[in-house]
């Protein structure tokens, strides 16, 4: 019996020994399975994590894009809604108040008869009647009456060409002015530019083949030739012809609907004449004093900054340019403490979009970092030929930068826009003027074609700066 049990034990041990490798193998397999399972779980976790990171990145990029374009998207929606609202109103008959009717009667029956003009006066150029207007007794009353403010003015348009000629003639500056003619290089509405130098220089720039690209001619030489060809004329006549609209040019304007071809070269001739600090300082003093003589004590003007150079053609910083404005304003305050000045930064709507964005950013930064030099900067504008240059709608992304900068700096430079300076129906800039909350519309001439838009402007209590003489002069 004992032998049997002993034999059984031996047999059992033998079986166990035979099964041991299998057990170990199963154990190893289980361990491998566990490791593989763990590895698979880790891979899944890693894949899920990567997927979440990628998804998160995509969501972030979408959010960022939406955040950047949020103003544009909401602007598009606002514009669409406003156009729909305006279109629903169609054209309704204007209803005038008793006060408006009375004012119109006084103007028609008492004021108009004092002007002895022909029946086509209202369709003609006002500049032709400048002397008649100034000799009229009513003009003297207007000149002397308190006016309070002028809110639409281009500082470059106020040049007294007689004063400027005297400035050129009385010292060495006269010898150092050159006229640069770009007309052989590019076709443009703005063919003239003035440059200053105190050192002898070649007046002609040529390419590799020797072809003249840019020709600079000393003003002294130009005026000498001018007087040789016109013995009965003086230097003053030369400036008058380049800064004023002449009778033959008026005829051209009357027969050619594109009056800008006459107007813009004169505008830019005036603009570049004062881009030397010596002339700018005197020009500002003259302009401010002339306005005070007419009982105007608040002046708000457009100003294009960043074009000043010294006598050696070195650029003068905008900070230095603003310092000139500040010094002149302080000098005028000593003469008349009631006078104040507001500058509207003027940019051109035909500039590259990136340039406009950079300029907007530059003026916000400057106003933030140099409040001592920018306290009189009150707004921004985009001006230029509305019939040919880009519309506000086309420039919407560039203009939206101001909304982003408002959040960044904590203040806002509002838009006071040239808006509707056109007689064309397709010009819809006034719609964007409303959406940009331009509290004043420069010109707004084509609003006569949009009485429904005009109603929106009246509801918002915005002003329209009607520059009647300029509008007629440029056939608007």
Image (spheres, rainbow, N blue to C red):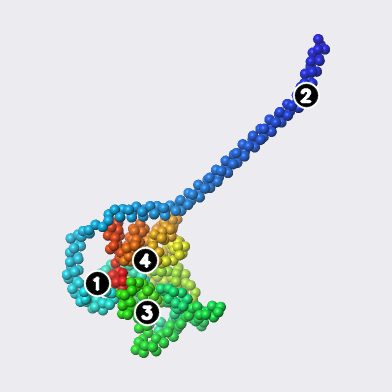
Separation of marks 4 and 1 at Cα, in angstroms: 23 Å
In this rendered view, identify the residue nearer to me: 230 or 379.
Answer: 230
The crowd level at tag 3 (other Cα within 10 Å; few <14, some 14-19, many 20+) is: some
- Distance between the alpha carbons at the discs numbered 1 and 3: 26 Å
First in sequence, mark 1 or 3: give its number.
Answer: 1
Callout 1–callout 3 Cβ contact below 8 Å:
no
**Residue depicted at 81% across the width and 15% down the height:** 7
Q: Secondary structure at mark 2?
A: helix
Residue depicted at 42% across the width and 84% down the height: 222
Circle 2 residue = 18
The residues bearing labels 2 and 3 have C-alpha atoms spaced at a distance of 118 Å
Q: Quadrant of the N terminus?
A: top right
Q: Earlier in the sequence, mark 4 or mark 2?
A: 2
The answer to whether residue 329 is seen in the rendering is: yes
Residue highlighted by disc 3: 242
Q: Nearer the viewer, mark 4 or mark 3?
A: 4
Looking at the rendered structure, the secondary structure element under dot 1 is helix
Q: Residues within 10 Å of mark 1 (few under 14, many from 20)?
A: few
SS at circle 4 = loop
Residue 122: image tag:
1
Please tell me which of labels 4 and 3 falls first in the chain.
3
Q: CA distance from mark 2 to mark 1?
A: 123 Å
| Residue 408: x %, y % from top left | 45, 55
Residue that mark 4 sits on? 386
Q: Position of residue 70 (x, y in %)?
A: 43, 52
The residue drawn where x is 35% and y is 68% is 301
In primary-sequence order, the first of circles 2 and 1 is: 2
Name the residue located 79 percent from the left edge and 13 percent from the top edge.
5
How far is mark 4 from mark 3, CA to CA? 24 Å
Please provide percent x and percent y for residue 343. 37, 66
């Amino acid at each position: 019996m004992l032998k049997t049990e002993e034999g059984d034990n031996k047999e059992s041990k033998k079986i166990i020994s035979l099964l041991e490798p299998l057990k170990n193998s199963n154990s190893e397999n289980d361990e491998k399975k566990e490791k593989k399972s763990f590895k698979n779980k880790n891979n899944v976790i890693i894949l899920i994590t990567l997927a979440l990171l990628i998804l998160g990145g995509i969501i972030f990029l979408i959010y960022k894009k939406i955040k950047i374009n949020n103003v544009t998207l909401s602007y598009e929606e606002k514009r669409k809604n406003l156009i729909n609202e305006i279109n629903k109103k169609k054209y309704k008959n204007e209803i005038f108040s008793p006060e408006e009717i009375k004012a119109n009667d006084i103007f028609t029956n008492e004021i108009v008869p004092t002007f002895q003009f022909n029946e086509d006066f209202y369709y003609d150029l006002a500049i032709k009647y400048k002397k008649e207007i100034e000799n009229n007794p009513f003009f003297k009353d207007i000149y002397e009456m308190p006016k309070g403010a002028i809110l639409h003015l281009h500082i470059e348009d106020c040049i007294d060409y007689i004063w400027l000629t005297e400035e050129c003639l009385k010292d060495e500056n006269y010898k150092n002015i050159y006229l640069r003619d770009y007309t052989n290089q590019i076709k443009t509405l703005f063919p003239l530019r003035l440059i200053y130098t105190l050192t002898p220089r070649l007046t002609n720039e040529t390419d590799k083949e020797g072809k003249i690209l840019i020709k600079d001619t000393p003003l002294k030489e130009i005026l000498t030739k001018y007087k040789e060809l016109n013995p009965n004329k003086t230097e003053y006549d030369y400036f008058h012809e380049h800064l004023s609209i002449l009778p033959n040019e008026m005829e051209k304007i009357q027969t050619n609907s594109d009056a800008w071809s006459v107007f813009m070269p004169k505008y830019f001739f005036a603009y570049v004449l004062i881009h030397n600090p010596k002339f700018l300082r005197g020009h500002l003093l003259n302009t401010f004093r002339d306005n005070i003589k007419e009982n105007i004590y608040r002046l708000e003007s457009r100003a294009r900054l960043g074009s000043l150079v010294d006598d050696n053609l070195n650029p003068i910083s905008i900070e230095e340019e603003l310092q000139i404005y500040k010094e002149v304003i302080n000098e005028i305050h000593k003469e008349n403490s009631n006078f104040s000045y507001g500058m509207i930064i003027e940019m051109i709507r035909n500039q590259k979009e990136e340039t406009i964005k950079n300029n907007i950013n530059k003026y916000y930064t400057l106003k933030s970092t140099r409040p001592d030099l920018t306290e009189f900067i009150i707004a921004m504008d985009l001006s230029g030929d509305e019939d040919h240059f880009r519309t506000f709608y086309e420039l919407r992304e560039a203009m939206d930068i101001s909304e982003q900068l408002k959040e960044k700096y904590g203040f806002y430079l509002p838009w006071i826009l040239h808006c509707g300076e056109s007689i064309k129906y397709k010009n819809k800039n006034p719609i964007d003027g409303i959406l940009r909350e331009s509290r004043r519309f420069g010109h707004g001439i084509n609003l006569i074609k949009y009485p429904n838009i005009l109603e929106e402007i009246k509801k918002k209590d915005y002003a329209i700066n009607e520059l009647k003489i300029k509008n007629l002069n440029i056939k608007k």
